[in-house]
Image (cartoon, rainbow, N blue to C red):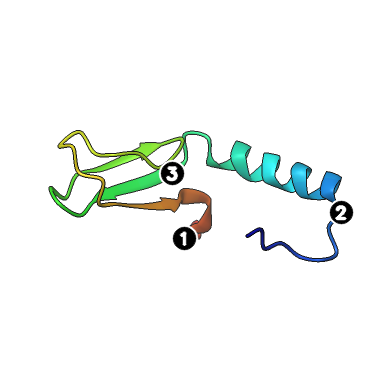
Amino acid sequence: MNHFPAQLNPDELREWQLKIEVANRHNIWCHCRQCDREWIASKPSVCECGSAQVESIACWQFPDD
């Protein structure tokens, strides 16, 4: 099910999604809940230890303090 603001038409939605994809490039903080490893990636992925229990957060969501 797709949830997006009703005020965006399909072209605007695609443009918004592309901007988010660009913002995420090399900018996803990943943390393995199994081995505690942390890394930055372009998309959520499994850990080198093989665990899929990975927390992933877009770095641009963190404030620049």
Judge the density around disc 3: few (<14), some (14-19), many (≥20) Cα neighbours within 10 Å. many
| Mark with earlier residue (2, 3) | 2
Secondary element type, mark 3: strand
- Numbered tag placed on residue 17 in the rendering: none
Secondary element type, mark 1: loop
**What residue is at 28 percent from the left and 39 percent from the top?**
46
The residue under label 3 is 28
The residue under label 2 is 9
**Which is more foreground, mark 3 or mark 1?**
3
What amino acid is found at the position of numbered circle 3 in the picture?
Answer: Ile
Judge the density around disc 2: few (<14), some (14-19), many (≥20) Cα neighbours within 10 Å. few
Number of marks in the image?
3
**What residue is at 26 percent from the left and 46 percent from the top?**
52
Please give left or right for residue 20 compared with residue 36 in the image. right
Determine whether label 2 and label 3 are within 8 Å by CB: no
Determine whether label 3 and label 1 are within 8 Å by CB: no
The residue under label 1 is 65
| Mark with earlier residue (3, 1) | 3
**26 versus 51 height, above or below:** above
Secondary element type, mark 2: loop
What amino acid is found at the position of numbered circle 2 in the picture?
Answer: Asn
**What residue is at 43 percent from the left and 44 percent from the top?**
28
Please give left or right for residue 18 compared with residue 51 in the image. right
What amino acid is found at the position of numbered circle 1 in the picture?
Answer: Asp
| Mark with earlier residue (2, 1) | 2
**Which is more foreground, mark 2 or mark 3?**
2
